[in-house]
Image: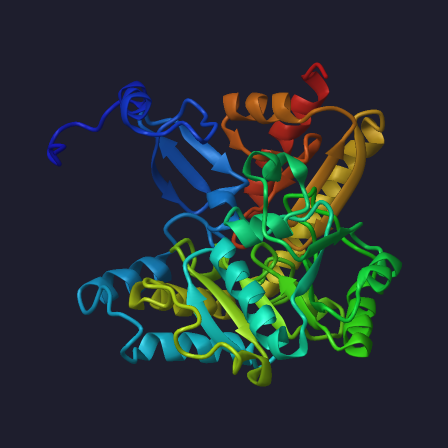
């Protein structure tokens, strides 16, 4: 066992441990992060980084937000975990908070986005079972997770090919294409599952009539509308959930990532009459809705509301938009498009973004590349104007200098 009183390991020593004992299924940067505060993180050598992609979108309030830290510390001293054969005050309170800020749905708690989507798929099939409905329609370029049904729903062959055959009953259509959905749906289709904004697919914002159009098709055909808000939920887009920009409501919604301020948590919410089909014994999650995650989630809701972060998220997005629009005017040959909704930001480049990510890391800025050529930022809702400008300055210099 490691000596807790010994000097911290260097990055190189930690990397050596990984090379000997950890399956290398992730591409990792050669940095060992040891501490975080807000939008700053530090490595084992004491170097500070500005984080524009904190926790892969999970740390919506930055690293170690005070209310979450205090709530978790208090909860650990009271009750760490009990199974879902018992009632827990924190779980009931968190379900109420989410229901009241969305469409009045009932909650099933789990640990991740993939688990939430698996639950949604199973619920849709349970709902459709007596009607002979089991098929689901999903969108190309989407991402719903890496468990088997969620992977099948993810219409990206690069993730699916090594694991064939996948789960039957899924059909894929182009994103933002209502006609394709209407054409594919038949009497055996139980649900349509899409992201309100595609995240991993490149921060793709659909036309304004897309979600209302899907709602109309589902109502006319007797199908459920499932919205995957794993990445867009919990105030990411300037509303509690991205669907709230569209004026419609889903039948089922999934959320994770930022749900509990960085603590592992996921949720599936469903209209009461749909949720009733998930009877005892049909689905479960051992750690789902545990007291620590739910206290973290309640503290996340409290922080967002008491600090006015819904409004702040919109302001952050507009500041980024102004910076990137000016940069696009400067280098239109390098920046093809800018897609922003709150603190969900995509900068579409005319070349592969991998070198941009690496160069920014070397200058102390953490960002992400997705879909090959899109710089994706999921910054914290409490990022300061000064931090925005500092990070944008670094990214601008890199985009001017990097060789495509």
Q: Taking the image as drawn, is residue 383 in sight?
A: no
Q: Position of residue 33 (x, y in %)?
A: 36, 33
Pick the front one: 203 or 130: 130
The residue that appears at 54% across and 79% down in the rendered structure is: 275
Which quadrant of the figure contains the C terminus?
top right
The count of marks equals: 0
In the picture, residue 84 is in which quadrant? bottom left
| Residue located at (52% from left, 25% from top) | 361
In the depicted structure, whether residue 213 falls above or below residue 95: above
Q: Position of residue 248 (x, y in %)?
A: 74, 74
Dividing the picture into quadrants, the one containing residue 7 is top left
Considering depth in this image, is 310 or 161 the residue closer to the camera?
A: 161
Q: Is residue 102 above or below residue 397?
A: below
Percent x, y for residue 304? 50, 65
User: In the rendered view, how is the structure colored?
Assistant: rainbow
In this image, 222 relative to 168: left or right? right
The x, y position of residue 126, in whole percent, is 56, 73
In the displayed structure image, the side of residue 61 where residue 273 appears, left or right:
right
Q: Residue at x 44, y 39 (%)?
A: 40
Decide: is 304 above or below 87.
above
Q: Residue furthest bottom?
A: 273
Depth check, front residue: 173 or 326: 173
């Amino acid at each position: 066992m490691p000596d807790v009183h010994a000097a911290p390991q260097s990055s190189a020593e930690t990397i050596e441990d990984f090379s000997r004992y950890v399956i290398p299924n992730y591409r990792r940067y050669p940095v060992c992060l040891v501490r975080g505060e807000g939008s700053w993180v530090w490595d084992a050598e004491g170097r500070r980084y500005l984080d524009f992609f904190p926790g892969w979108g999970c740390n919506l309030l930055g690293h170690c937000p005070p209310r979450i830290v205090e709530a978790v510390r208090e909860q650990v001293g009271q009750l760490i975990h009990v199974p879902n054969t018992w009632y827990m005050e924190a779980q009931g309170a968190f379900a109420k908070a989410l229901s009241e800020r969305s469409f009045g749905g009932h909650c099933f708690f789990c640990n991740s986005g993939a688990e939430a989507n698996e639950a949604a798929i199973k619920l849709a099939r349970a709902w459709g079972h007596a009607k002979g409905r089991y098929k689901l329609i999903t969108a190309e370029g989407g991402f719903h997770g890496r468990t088997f049904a969620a992977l099948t729903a993810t219409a990206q062959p690069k993730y699916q090919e090594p694991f064939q055959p996948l789960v039957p009953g899924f059909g894929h259509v182009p994103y933002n294409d209502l006609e394709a959905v209407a054409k594919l749906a038949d009497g055996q289709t139980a649900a349509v599952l899409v992201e309100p904004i595609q995240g991993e697919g490149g921060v793709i914002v659909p036309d304004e009539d897309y979600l209302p159009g899907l709602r109309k098709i589902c109502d006319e055909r007797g199908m459920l509308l499932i919205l995957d808000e794993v990445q867009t939920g919990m105030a990411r887009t300037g509303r509690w959930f991205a669907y709230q920009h569209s004026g419609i409501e889903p039948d089922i919604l999934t959320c994770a990532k930022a749900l509990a301020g960085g603590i592992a948590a996921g949720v599936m919410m469903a209209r009461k009459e749909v949720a009733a089909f998930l009877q005892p014994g049909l689905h479960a999650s051992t750690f789902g809705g545990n007291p620590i995650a739910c206290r973290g989630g309640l503290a996340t809701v409290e922080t967002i509301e008491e600090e006015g972060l819904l409004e702040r998220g919109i302001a952050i997005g507009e500041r980024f938009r102004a910076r990137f629009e000016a940069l696009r005017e400067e280098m239109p040959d390098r920046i093809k498009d800018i897609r922003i909704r709150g603190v969900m930001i995509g900068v579409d480049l005319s070349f592969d973004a991998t070198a941009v990510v690496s160069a920014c890391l070397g200058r102390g800025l953490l960002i992400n590349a997705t879909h090959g050529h899109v710089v994706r930022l999921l910054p914290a809702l409490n990022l300061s104007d000064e931090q925005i400008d500092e990070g944008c300055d670094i990214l601008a210099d890199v985009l001017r200098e990097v060789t495509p």
